[in-house]
């Protein structure tokens, strides 16, 4: 599993380098009564990866889905899966979500007592490790750990609820992180999550976002392929 997860992230990175930013549809609003069909539709539409929001009702007020859904998506999917752990004490479940088939595991800086140890646990389990940061958290808090992660996911909404408006503070964070990456001669990837639409994706990409999580902009559209193509075209033109 270790080798496969690494290969999946490498394929995603190769797509970024060849074509520019990619859209990663979030499944939170999909039709869970027909989950395998939704996964197939998204992959056929050109989704480079899928984003799964795991919420525990503690770190965030909402409950979403957990192990059973992640395992089911893994069985149905051929593209990389990012599991976004919006949970308290994520260290407790990292190994299990890796075992269930996550290629990327994202944990929140706000939920970690020892971020470096958590990131090491993710990579040790064979996955790529992303650090997420909420809108209210100073971006400088990430700097001690940028050498230990494969990417940063900048939240452009408060985590836990779909359909929120894009918070432009994310652009400041992305710009700072892009400069830090250059300054540190690092290679971590930059992601953004929340409020992405045809109106906001260009500014996010111009600020440095490469892995762009889109929920309602894709799932609530009548044509997944058209939505993904339009969003990625706007992002790549702005990058």
Image (cartoon, rainbow, N blue to C red):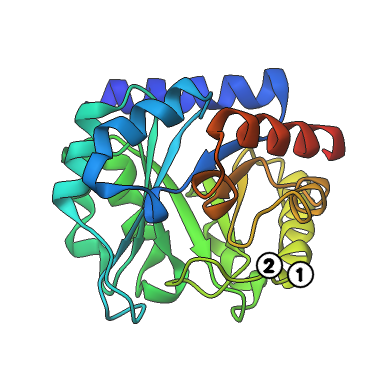
Residue 166 badge: 2
User: In the rendered image, which residue does mark 1 sit on?
Assistant: 168
Q: Residues within 10 Å of mark 1 (few under 14, many from 20)?
A: some
Whether residue 68 sits left or right of residue 205 in the image: it is: left
Q: Tell me the quarter of the picture where residue 74 sits.
A: top left
Q: Is residue 71 above or below residue 157?
A: above
Whether residue 234 sits left or right of residue 17 in the image: it is: right
Give x and y (percent) for residue 84: 38, 55
Farthest residue, direction front: 222
Nearest the viewer among 215 and 146 is: 215
**Residue at 17% of width from left, 40% of height from top?**
71
Q: How far apart are marks 1 and 2 (CA)?
A: 6 Å
| Quarter of the image that includes the C terminus | top right
Q: Tell me the quarter of the picture where residue 51 sits.
A: top left
Nearest the viewer among 116 and 225 is: 225
Is disc 2 placed on a helix, strand or loop? loop
Q: Nearer the viewer, mark 1 or mark 2?
A: 2
Nearest the viewer among 152 and 35 is: 35
Q: In this view, does 201 lie above or below 3?
A: below
Give x and y (percent) for residue 223: 56, 34
Give x and y (percent) for residue 229: 67, 29
- Residue 148 seen in render: yes
Give x and y (percent) for residue 163: 54, 66
Q: In this view, does 126 lie above or below 214?
A: above
Residue 41 badge: none
């Amino acid at each position: 599993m270790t080798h496969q997860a690494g290969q999946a992230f490498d394929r995603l990175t190769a797509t970024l380098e060849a074509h520019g930013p990619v859209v990663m549809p979030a499944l939170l609003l999909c039709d869970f009564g027909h989950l395998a069909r939704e996964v197939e539709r998204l992959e056929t539409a050109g989704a480079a990866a899928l984003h799964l929001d795991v919420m525990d009702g503690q770190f965030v007020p909402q409950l979403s889905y957990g192990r059973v859904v992640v395992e089911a998506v893994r069985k149905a999917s051929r593209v990389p899966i990012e599991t976004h752990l919006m949970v308290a004490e994520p260290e407790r479940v990292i190994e299990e979500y890796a075992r269930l088939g996550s290629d990327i595991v994202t944990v929140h800086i706000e939920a970690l007592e020892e971020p470096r140890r958590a990131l090491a646990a993710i990579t040790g389990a064979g996955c790529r490790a992303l650090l997420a940061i909420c809108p209210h958290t100073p971006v400088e808090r990430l700097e001690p750990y940028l050498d230990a992660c494969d990417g940063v996911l900048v939240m452009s909404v408060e985590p836990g609820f779909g359909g929120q408006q894009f918070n432009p503070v994310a652009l400041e964070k992305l710009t700072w992180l892009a400069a830090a990456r250059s300054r540190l001669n690092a290679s971590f990837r930059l992601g953004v999550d929340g409020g992405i639409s045809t109106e906001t994706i260009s500014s996010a990409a111009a600020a440095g976002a490469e892995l762009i999580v889109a929920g309602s902009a894709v799932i609530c559209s009548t044509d997944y392929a058209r939505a993904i193509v339009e969003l990625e075209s706007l992002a790549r033109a702005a990058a």
